[in-house]
Amino acid sequence: MKEVKTRVCPKCGEEKPLTEEFWPKNCSKKNGLERYCIKCKKEYDVEYYQKNKEKILFKQRKYYSENTLRCLQANKKHYEKNKDIIYLKSLKYKHDHLLLTRQYRNNWIIRNPEKNEMIIKASRKKRIKNIDVHYVRSLIHQMGIDRIDITPEMIELKRVQIQLFRTLKQFKKEEAA
Ligand SMILES: [Zn+2]
C-alpha cells in the first residue's frame, strides 16, 4: 500500500494529506504547494484583502493602465460569454436611474442629430442580422410581455425560434430556385 504523505499546517495546526485537495497550488514553492492549508489560505486572503484594499486596488489600476489592450480583450471575452445577463443588469440599472440616463441621452441627441440617426439605422440592421438580444427582446415585447419580465431563457428560446424560421425560409428559397 502506498503511504500518503501528510503535513501539519502552521496556522491551524491540523495534519492533512499532502495533496492539492488540501493545499493550494503554488508553483514558486519547492513541492508546488502553499505553506498554509486551503482553509487557512482562504481566510488569510480575505484578511489580506481587507487590510490592503487600497494597495491592491492601486496595483490593479496600474496593471490595467499598463496592459489596457490585454485587459480590454479579456473584458470582451467575459462580455461575449455573459452578454444577456449583463444586458439585463444594465437594463435594471437604467430602470433605476431612468431620469438621469434619459436626460444624458437627450442632451447628446440634441448635440448630434445626424450621428444619432446613423447609429440607430446601422445598429438596427446589425441587431436583426445577428439575432441580437435587443432585437429579440423587442420581438418578445411586441408579443405583449413587459420588458422587465423578460428572462434570459425566453430570449434564448425566441432566438432558436428565429433561427429555425430563417433556415426554413432559406430551404424554401433554394427549393423554388
Ligand atoms: Zn490550516
Image (cartoon, rainbow, N blue to C red):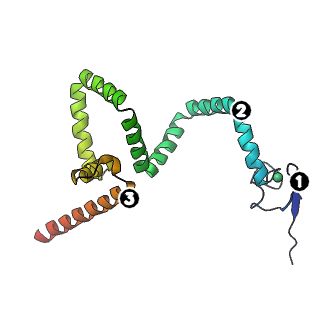
Q: How crowded is mark 2: few (under 14 residues within 10 Å), some or many (20 or more)?
A: few
Rendered residue at 14%/66% (across/down) = 173
Question: Within the image, what quadrant is residue 1 found in?
Answer: bottom right
Looking at the image, is mark 3 or mark 2 nearer the viewer? Answer: 3
Under mark 1, the amino acid is Gly
> Residue 30's spot in the image, x, y percent?
83, 52
Q: Disc 2 on helix, strand or loop?
A: helix
Q: Is residue 112 left or right of residue 60?
A: left
Task: Determine which of the numbered discs, if any, sits on residue 117 in the image.
Answer: none
Under mark 2, the amino acid is Asn
Of residues 91 and 119, the one drawn nearer to the viewer in this rendering: 91
Q: Residues within 10 Å of mark 3 (few under 14, many from 20)?
A: few
Picture layout, residue 176 above or below residue 118: below
Question: Within the image, what quadrant is residue 63 found in?
Answer: top right
Q: Which mark is first along the chain, 2 or 3?
A: 2
> Residue 157's spot in the image, x, y percent?
33, 61
Under mark 3, the amino acid is Glu
Name the residue that disc number 2 marks: 52
Name the residue that disc number 3 marks: 153
Rendered residue at 83%/61% (across/down) = 18
Q: Disc 1 on helix, strand or loop?
A: loop
Does the closest atom of ligand 1 sit within 8 Å of the Cβ of label 1? yes
Real-space CA distance between mark 3 and mark 2, rounded to the nearest whole angstrom:
40 Å
